[in-house]
Image: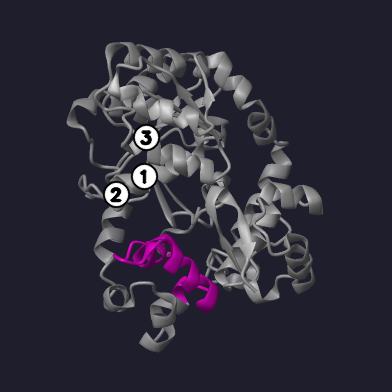
């Protein structure tokens, strides 16, 4: 974890309105440290900002200092509270495989659940009693098998999946579309208390962020990324659950759907997913069978998992940790962050990856197998190449060369 002062400065940049994960990554890549960003001129900052006309004055005026202060107070005034940055070894690796990782995660509860194998369950807010029963049953059964259930803390299917998972021996993660200090919907207050004690609540949004429609699709991408697979239980043909399923498919995750009555419009979305290739599942055993390969890959040896997380985040977070004494960073100790400037990444390795890619879209798992590279190391270089504009992500989590 960052020192308090370093965390405060990090949040002052990362929580700047209109900044976003892509601009944050570009700032870190081009300028190298939080302190350098805070001291940079407008000419240095502007090329890194997607919405420079809005974000630049807010960043230069340190508008997010109030949000940073609020976050520090929240962190220090309660139990089971954490703030993860891209510099922390506990930051979930899955959130940056094929997507821009949020620079900050606010967490309330058991942070160890982030390191457990996870499956997402999503569905209608206005679910039928039968669908609610299925979600709760699936949540409990998966939890009993050591799976952490991820959902969006909404009414209906989400809440039922969380409740079921809390009954099992594992637990559940609720990804919020609000600030970590906001319970929405309000009727889930008791569920929020229980999850903050034995489960985990997670948000990428600053404290005091109230429910806003545009934030829920952003939340959905985290749900899709955290799980090795996503199960949809009852969803209309146009629903946020189908967005989550689409995002999961684009990230290369397993997508599953529970069929329902052909007369129930709330099942139309699930039937569409199945027609489009999602796996039809009717039990927790079906889900586990469908995700067997992904779950096996998730359970890496502990030392290998830790050793690769630092490498993975280098292109996104260069030379920030311990900014006051960077010369003391231990690059050989996996317990401390290890960073290199992107410019010092091995160009020979980059060229080897580009040659192996060719110019057709390719999935990173296929590329990793061909190159015999660990996926975490490969993703680090792919992200760096993407920031340089040499490659781009396409549909279904594939990458393609642009030059």
Which of 98/345 is in front?
Answer: 98
The residue located at (38%, 72%) in the rendering is 50
- Queried whether the magenta region covers residue 59, the answer comes back as no
Pick whichever, 270 or 355, lies toward us.
Answer: 270
Q: Is residue 248 above or below residue 135?
A: below
Residue under label 2, please give it. Answer: 215
Q: Nearer the viewer, residue 69 or 392?
A: 392
- Would you name the residue on which mark 3 appears? 241
Distance from the alpha carbon under mark 3 to that under mark 1: 11 Å
Tell me which label, 2 or 3, sits earlier in the chain: 2
Main SS of the magenta segment?
A: helix
Residue at horizontal 59 percent and vertical 71 percent from the top: 326
Marks 1 and 2, how far apart in space?
A: 6 Å
**Could you say which disc has been placed on residue 256 in the image?**
none
Is the C-beta separation of discs 1 and 2 under 8 Å?
yes
Residue 162 placement, left or right of 190 = right
Q: Which of disc 1 and disc 3 is earlier in sequence?
A: 1
Dot 2 lies on which element? helix
Q: Which residue is disc 1 drawn over?
A: 219
- Label 3, secondary structure: give it: helix
The quarter of the picture where residue 10 lies is bottom left
For the record, the magenta segment spans 6-35
**Residue drawn at point x = 58 percent, y = 42 percent:** 252
Mark nearest the camera among 2 and 3 is: 3
In contact (CB < 8 Å): disc 2 and disc 3: no
């Amino acid at each position: 974890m960052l020192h308090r002062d370093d965390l405060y400065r990090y949040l002052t940049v990362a929580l700047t309105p209109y900044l976003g994960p892509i601009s944050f990554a570009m700032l870190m890549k081009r300028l190298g440290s939080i302190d350098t960003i805070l001291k940079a001129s407008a000419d240095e900052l502007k090329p890194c900002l997607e919405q420079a006309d809005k974000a630049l004055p807010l960043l230069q005026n340190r508008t997010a200092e109030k949000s940073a202060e609020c976050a520090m107070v929240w962190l220090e005034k309660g139990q089971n509270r954490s703030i993860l940055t891209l510099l922390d070894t506990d930051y979930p690796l899955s959130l940056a495989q094929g997507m821009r990782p949020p620079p900050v995660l606010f967490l309330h509860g058991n942070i160890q659940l982030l390191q457990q194998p996870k499956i997402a369950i999503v569905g209608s807010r206005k679910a039928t009693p039968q669908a609610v029963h299925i979600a709760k049953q699936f949540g409990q059964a998966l939890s009993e098998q050591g799976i952490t259930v991820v959902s969006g803390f909404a009414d209906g299917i989400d809440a039922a999946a969380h409740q079921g998972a809390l009954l099992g021996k594992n637990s559940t993660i609720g990804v919020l579309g609000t600030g970590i200090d906001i319970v929405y919907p309000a009727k889930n207050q008791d569920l929020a208390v229980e999850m903050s004690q034995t489960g985990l609540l997670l948000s990428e949004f600053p404290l005091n962020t109230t429910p806003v429609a545009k934030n829920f699709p952003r939340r959905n991408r985290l749900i899709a990324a955290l799980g090795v697979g996503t199960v949809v239980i009852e969803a209309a043909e146009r629903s946020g659950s189908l967005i989550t399923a689409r995002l999961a498919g684009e990230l290369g995750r397993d997508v599953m759907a529970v069929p329902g009555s052909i007369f129930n419009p709330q099942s139309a979305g699930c039937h569409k997913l199945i027609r489009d290739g999602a796996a039809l599942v009717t039990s927790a055993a079906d889900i586990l069978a469908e995700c067997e390969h992904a779950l096996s890959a998730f359970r890496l040896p502990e030392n290998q998992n830790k050793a690769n997380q630092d490498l993975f985040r280098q292109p996104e977070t260069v030379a920030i940790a311990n900014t006051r004494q960077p010369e003391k960073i231990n690059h050989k100790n996996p317990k401390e962050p290890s960073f290199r400037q992107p410019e010092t990444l091995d160009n020979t390795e980059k060229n080897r990856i580009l040659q192996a890619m060719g110019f057709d879209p390719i999935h990173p798992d296929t590329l990793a197998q061909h190159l015999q590279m660990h996926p975490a190391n490969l993703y680090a270089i792919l992200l760096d190449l993407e920031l340089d504009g040499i490659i781009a992500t396409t549909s279904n989590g594939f990458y393609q060369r642009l030059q």
